[in-house]
Image (tube, grey):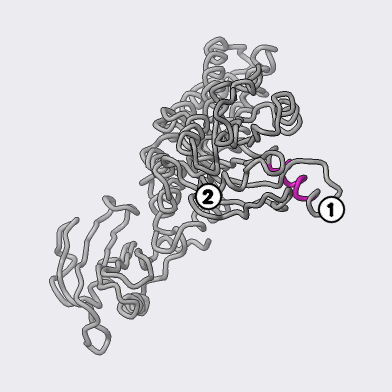
Amino acid sequence: MSQHFNSTIAALATSPAVSGIGIIRLSGPDAIELTQKIFVGKKLSEQAAYSMTFGQIVNTEGNIIDEVLISIFRAPHSYTGEDTVEINCHGSRFILSEVLSLLIKQGAQLAQAGEFTMRAYLNAKMDLSQAEAVADLIYSETVAQHKLAINQMKGGIKDSIAALRTNLIDFASLLELELDFSEEDVEFANRKNLIELVTKIQNKINELLKSFELGNAVKYGISTVIAGRPNAGKSTLLNALLEEDRAIVSEIAGTTRDTIEEKMNIRGLVFRFIDTAGIRDTKDTIEALGVQRTLDKIQNSSILIYVADVIGLSPEELWKDIHEVASVDQKIIILANKMDLFTVFDYTQYANQFILLDHIIPCSAKNKMNIEFLKNKLFEIAIDEQSMQDTEVAINARHRDCLNRAMIELNEVHQGLHSQLETDLIAQSLRRSIYELGGVTGEVSSEELLGNIFGRFCIGK
């Protein structure tokens, strides 16, 4: 991303589709002056901040392009921290294109993806984690995604990291002072207090690293595999969940040869349901590939819905299947399917020390019995509802990587303090941990990093 932050940039800030209103945004030292060159109405430089002025946009021949409202935001009290103008036009593609072209001819530069938000970051209007949350907010599609993005924009992870980093900097300064007076054999940094601080920070980082699973699930959806033996009712279940005939249902065993994936919003969380081939030994090459894909999907999923045919699957067979296919830390729901074929059936017999009774759901996928109960159970085991209120969530992989590297350095500091390592070696690890924590919020950054982050924004934001 090339940097021309002394220039004035312009871009369409609303969708390019035809609409009632379209907004063109300018930001930079000449934003007001450039707009005035194509605007007929009151003098914009004399208008108060946060005001709107009615007038007309005219081309170089004096022809009226549109009647508009001009919004004025003055530095530093604007989104970017610079003088900012928003031109509210009618949402014709022709009008918006003409107005933007006129501004470019007057000297404005076309904004790059994310450049308005990058300027907000560079002008200290927000830190890097908050800037990233802007993109997450734009692309949010569910209540949970929106809530996490809003919390991050309000400074969720920023405040925790900043406080921890400040304390580390204070101690690092004292250690550096000791190095300056190494010949005097003096100690300015209390080692006991430093150990307590490092332990406290390690605990907080561990909390944030654990929260990454939550943030990742909310952003990208919770991988939920529907598995079981052939003809257990897996495809019927997927259709019942989606309330449409998405998967082919047949009494012929092995109908599903490949995985079928569909997304569904349950109470604000996106679940990525994956219908899989029935698990069995087979000599059919194609079906065998499908079974292997099923096993791979199960291992990489967050939740396993194991569909058990109550007619043909004994508790012992179920326990054997689960032991062979599920991972130790996987969340599992047993769906005791085809209950419509029994007047009385004790589904609780499927429970044992590894399969919780309240994770066994009697069901008839065919008749949609207990489908809503299953949805609520999925939400319940996928995520703690209270944790969605938590503002301190590491919501992307960059945060996680920075925190992991900071933890490695803090472990070195902790071990060094206990083994009475040389002060200069402890100070090196402490400096690196401070650097990595600063990477989360953007106290330390590079042009390449900023380009990668802001490059995924839309033009005009």
Residue 263, label in figure: 2
Say few, some or many: other residues with alpha carbon within 10 Å of mark 2 (under 14 / 14 to 19 / 20 or more).
some
Q: Quadrant of residue 183?
A: top right
Report the amino acid beneath label 2.
Answer: Lys
Q: Is residue 151 left or right of residue 161?
A: left
Identify which residue is drawn at 42% across, 60% down: 5
Outermost bottom residue: 61
In this rendered view, identify the residue nearer to me: 379 or 240.
240
Q: What percent of the width, then of the height, locates residue 50?
A: 19, 56
Residue ID for mark 1: 285
Q: Please, what secondary structure does the residue beneath circle 2 have?
A: strand
Whether residue 292 is in magenta: the answer is yes
Outermost front residue: 343
Q: What percent of the width, then of the height, locates residue 53?
A: 15, 66
Report the amino acid beneath label 1.
Answer: Thr
Q: Specify start and end residues of the magenta stretch as a single range.
A: 289-297
Q: Is residue 320 left or right of residue 346?
A: right
Q: Is residue 134 visible?
A: yes
Whether residue 104 is in magenta: the answer is no
Q: Quadrant of residue 230?
A: top right
Q: For the residues carrying marks 2 and 1, which lies nearer the camera in this image? A: 1
Identify which residue is drawn at 17% across, 62% down: 52
Q: What percent of the width, then of the height, locates residue 246?
A: 56, 55
Residue 73's place in the image compared with 404, above or below, is below
Residue 68's place in the image compared with 160, above or below, is below
In this rendered view, identify the residue nearer to me: 312 or 97.
312
In this rendered view, identify the residue nearer to me: 40 or 231.
231
Q: What percent of the width, then of the height, locates residue 91?
A: 29, 72
Q: Who comes first in sequence, dot 2 or dot 1?
A: 2
